[in-house]
Image (spheres, rainbow, N blue to C red):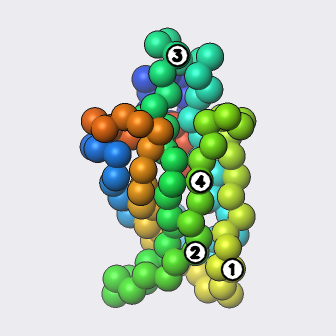
């Protein structure tokens, strides 16, 4: 979705969750961008639902995973953060798995406002 206003997020239950993303074509990923509003943009000034630690893996159609990187979204930096993949492989994937390992303190849910795959 294009609207990144507070409250218009992609919610995950709990502070640890995962999602598999089917890409529109096979992509050789080089980076991933995550977006979450800054504290001053939030209606309540609380952005504890922002993702903190997360991993990205390429997933084969058979289910085999290849870890592409482990990252930390820093709420003290810009709301849009791009993470170059650490394990650059000359391989393309139809699926990516994003595992949210933790958020910034909200035990009920984690929100991602925009996720972009570069490749």
Q: Which residue is mark 3?
A: 45
Residue at the extreme top: 43
Give the mark toward the camera: 3 or 2. 3
> In the drawing, what numbered circle is on residue 36?
none
Residue under the point 43% across and 66% down: 97
Q: Secondary structure at mark 2?
A: strand
Q: Are marks 3 and 2 in contact (CB under 8 Å)?
A: no
Q: Secondary structure at mark 3?
A: loop
Taking 20 as reference, is 72 left or right?
Answer: right
Q: Is residue 84 left or right of residue 99?
A: right
Q: CA distance from mark 1 to mark 4?
A: 18 Å
Q: CA distance from mark 3 to mark 1?
A: 37 Å
- Distance Cα–Cα, label 3 vs label 2: 33 Å
- Residue 88's disc is 1
Q: Position of residue 29 (x, y in %)?
A: 64, 71
Q: Which residue is mark 2?
A: 68
| Residue carrying label 4 | 72
The C terminus - image quarter: bottom right
Left or right of 32? Residue 104 is left
User: Viewer-nearest of labels 2 and 4?
Assistant: 4
Front-lying residue, 71 or 98: 71
Q: Are marks 1 and 2 in contact (CB under 8 Å)?
A: yes
Mark nearer the N terminus (3 vs 2): 3
> In the orientation shown, which residue stands out farthest toward the front?
105
Q: CA distance from mark 2 to mark 4?
A: 14 Å
Say whether disc 4 or disc 3 marks the residue closer to the N-terminus: 3
Instruction: Give the spatial CA distance, label 4 vs label 3.
Output: 21 Å
């Amino acid at each position: 979705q294009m609207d990144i206003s507070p409250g218009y997020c992609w919610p995950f239950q709990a502070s640890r969750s995962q999602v598999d993303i089917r890409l529109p074509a096979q992509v050789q990923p080089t980076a991933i961008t995550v977006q979450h509003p800054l504290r001053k943009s939030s209606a309540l000034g609380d952005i504890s639902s922002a993702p903190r630690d997360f991993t990205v893996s390429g997933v084969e159609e058979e289910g085999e995973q290849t870890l592409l990187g482990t990252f930390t979204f820093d709420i003290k930096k810009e709301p849009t953060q791009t993470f170059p993949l650490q394990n650059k492989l000359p391989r393309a994937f139809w699926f990516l798995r994003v595992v949210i390992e933790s958020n910034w303190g909200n035990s009920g849910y984690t929100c991602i406002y925009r996720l972009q795959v570069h490749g």
